[in-house]
């Protein structure tokens, strides 16, 4: 059965107190909306429709940046969830399969939960995701009759007896596309809020002789985010889950609560992550790697046996081969570092290629930017770059070549050559003492003038 996702992302989110649309606030480095899309992707949907409203251009752009195949539908007026789903009708034209309705501000629905909903469709025409709430509060209630779902009642419209029910509605729904749209067409806004509730389709389905059922999940999966406090709580829950998965996968976290993951972080088994390491989006680490304390990795790849840090920064495009050593206060960006190379401290390597077993001394800088364009530095295999060398790109250092400490290298260095680019030292005996005496005299004169 083909699957389509309809993701509702039109809400304004006034409680976020932000100019940014609510669904674009980030968890683990990715907008909430992206988390919702990723959850549904396990079902291999043939169509994904995101329904936008407030900040629609931004929301649509973010969705398409992550998944270019997304279709965008616009809800100009927020008249309720059924009305929002109805806006996806045109994007679903010609689609013959099941639709699962998700929410852009509910990012933690797990893939296996959606798979269970898909399986439940074989027994029911409409399937709703529910959860047992510790505090049902103002959630809508699922009114069950054995294994069948009779109806969903919103809190505002519930009787006192119905409000005692603890099985609550997440809002996630699965149904055949044609059936779903027919039921939505029959929804009215005759309720306390004057809105078109998607939840009404259950009662309508039952009145037409169709069956409805419920699948349940842990309450934490259904967490909706409406405020900064809830966003912070969601970030904490996400990080706790990522840390637990890393430990389960054979990664050593010496201080788990201090390590922060992005939504797409990948770390191989038998790697060790020391305290206070932050992974931004796009970081992947192979097995047997050590990431030492206070390092930051984003958009990079670290191969087996490498050691990174402490206090290192790997920026997008950094590619470290096997057994590379990157030490304290080293920054690498858009550069490939080949097997066994060492960049141990106080160095910037950007827009560069570093050959295998090369050694870059402290304070080495690839001067890659001329104020307008970026230029490339190539450092050959086994090259030795002396401390405080400025490599002014574009420049190439050959295999087995060497630069003298403190050099400014502006021309290519052939393999095996030694390049020194610094002014000759001149020593003036006694001049330092005279200069200090002169400067101290000037300071005394200024002090007297002030008095």
Image (cartoon, rainbow, N blue to C red):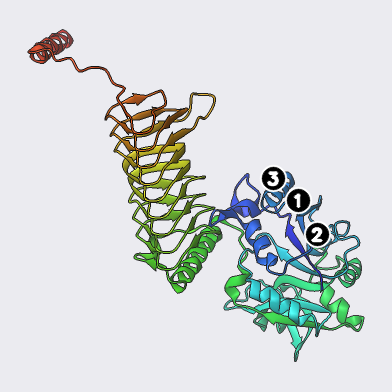
| Circle 1/circle 2 CB separation < 8 Å | yes
Residue 53's disc is 1
- Judging from the image, what secondary structure is the residue with disc 3 in? helix
The quarter of the rendered structure image containing the C terminus is: top left
**The residue tagged with tag 2: helix, strand or loop?**
helix
* Towards the viewer: 173 or 331: 331
Q: Is residue 431 above or below residue 135?
A: above
Q: Which residue is identified by label 2?
A: 84
Q: Is residue 159 visible?
A: no
Q: As displayed, is residue 417 above or below residue 215?
A: above
Mark with earlier residue (2, 3): 3
Give how far across and how far down residue 82 sits, in percent.
82, 64
Where disc 1 sits, the SS reads loop
Residue at the image point whose x is 29% and y is 24% from the top: 420
Seen from this angle, which residue lies furthest front? Answer: 416
10 Å crowding of disc 3: few (<14), some (14-19), many (20+): some
Q: Is residue 319 left or right of residue 46?
A: left
Of mark 1 and mark 2, the one earlier in the sequence is: 1
The image quadrant that residue 10 belongs to is: bottom right
Q: Residue 236: horizontal and vertical position, in percent? A: 48, 63
Label 1 to label 2, Cα distance in Å? Answer: 9 Å
Please give the residue where the numbered disc 3 appears in the rendered image: 58
Q: Quadrant of residue 346?
A: top left
Do residues under tags 2 and 3 come within 8 Å of each other at their CB atoms? no
Q: Nearer the viewer, residue 398 or 174?
A: 398
Against 262, residue 254 (above or below) is below
Query: Comparing marks 3 and 1, which lies closer to the viewer?
Result: 3
Name the N-terminal-most of marks 3 and 1. Answer: 1
- Nearest to the eye among marks 2 and 3: give it: 3
């Amino acid at each position: 059965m083909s699957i389509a996702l309809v993701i509702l992302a039109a809400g304004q989110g006034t409680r976020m107190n932000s100019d940014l649309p609510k669904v674009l606030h980030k968890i683990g480095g990715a907008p909430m909306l992206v988390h919702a899309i990723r959850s549904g992707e396990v079902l291999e949907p043939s169509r994904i429709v995101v329904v936008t409203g407030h900040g629609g251009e931004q929301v649509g752009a973010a969705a398409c940046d992550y998944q270019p195949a997304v279709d965008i539908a616009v809800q100009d007026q927020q008249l309720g969830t059924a009305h929002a789903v109805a806006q996806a009708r045109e994007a679903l034209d010609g689609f013959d399969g099941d639709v699962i309705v998700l929410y852009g501000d509910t990012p933690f629905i797990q893939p296996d939960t959606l798979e269970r909903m898909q399986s439940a469709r074989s027994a029911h025409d409409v399937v709703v995701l529910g959860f047992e709430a510790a505090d049902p509060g103002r959630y809508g209630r699922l009114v069950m009759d054995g294994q069948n779902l009779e109806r969903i009642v919103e809190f505002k419209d519930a009787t006192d007896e119905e409000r005692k029910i603890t099985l609550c509605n997440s809002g996630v729904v699965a149904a055949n596309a044609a059936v779903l749209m027919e039921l939505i067409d029959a929804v009215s806004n005759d309720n306390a809020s004057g809105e078109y509730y998607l939840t009404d389709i259950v009662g309508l389905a039952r009145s037409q002789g169709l069956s409805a059922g419920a699948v349940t999940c842990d309450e934490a999966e259904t967490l909706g985010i409406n405020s900064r406090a809830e966003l912070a709580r969601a970030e904490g829950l996400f990080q706790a889950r990522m840390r637990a998965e890393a430990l389960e996968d054979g990664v050593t976290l010496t201080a788990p609560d201090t390590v922060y993951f992005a939504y797409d972080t990948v770390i191989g088994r038998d790697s060790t992550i020391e305290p206070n390491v932050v992974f931004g989006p796009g970081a992947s680490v192979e097995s047997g790697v050590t990431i030492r304390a206070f390092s930051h990795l984003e958009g990079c790849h670290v191969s087996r046996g490498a050691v990174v840090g402490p206090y290192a920064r790997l920026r997008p495009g950094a590619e470290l081969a096997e057994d590379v050593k990157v030490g304290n206060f080293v920054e690498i960006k858009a550069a490939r570092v080949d097997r066994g190379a060492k960049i141990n401290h106080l160095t910037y390597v950007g827009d560069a290629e570093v050959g295998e077993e090369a050694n870059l001394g402290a304070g080495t800088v690839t001067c890659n930017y001329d104020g307008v364009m970026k230029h490339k530095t190539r450092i050959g295999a086994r090259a030795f770059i002396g401390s405080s060398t400025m490599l002014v790109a574009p420049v190439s250092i050959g295999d087995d070549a060497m630069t003298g400490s403190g050099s400014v290298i502006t021309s290519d260095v052939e393999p095996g050559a030694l390049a020194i680019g610094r002014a000759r030292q001149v020593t003036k005996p006694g001049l330092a003492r005279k200069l200090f005496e002169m400067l101290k005299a000037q300071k005394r004169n200024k002090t007297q003038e002030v008095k």
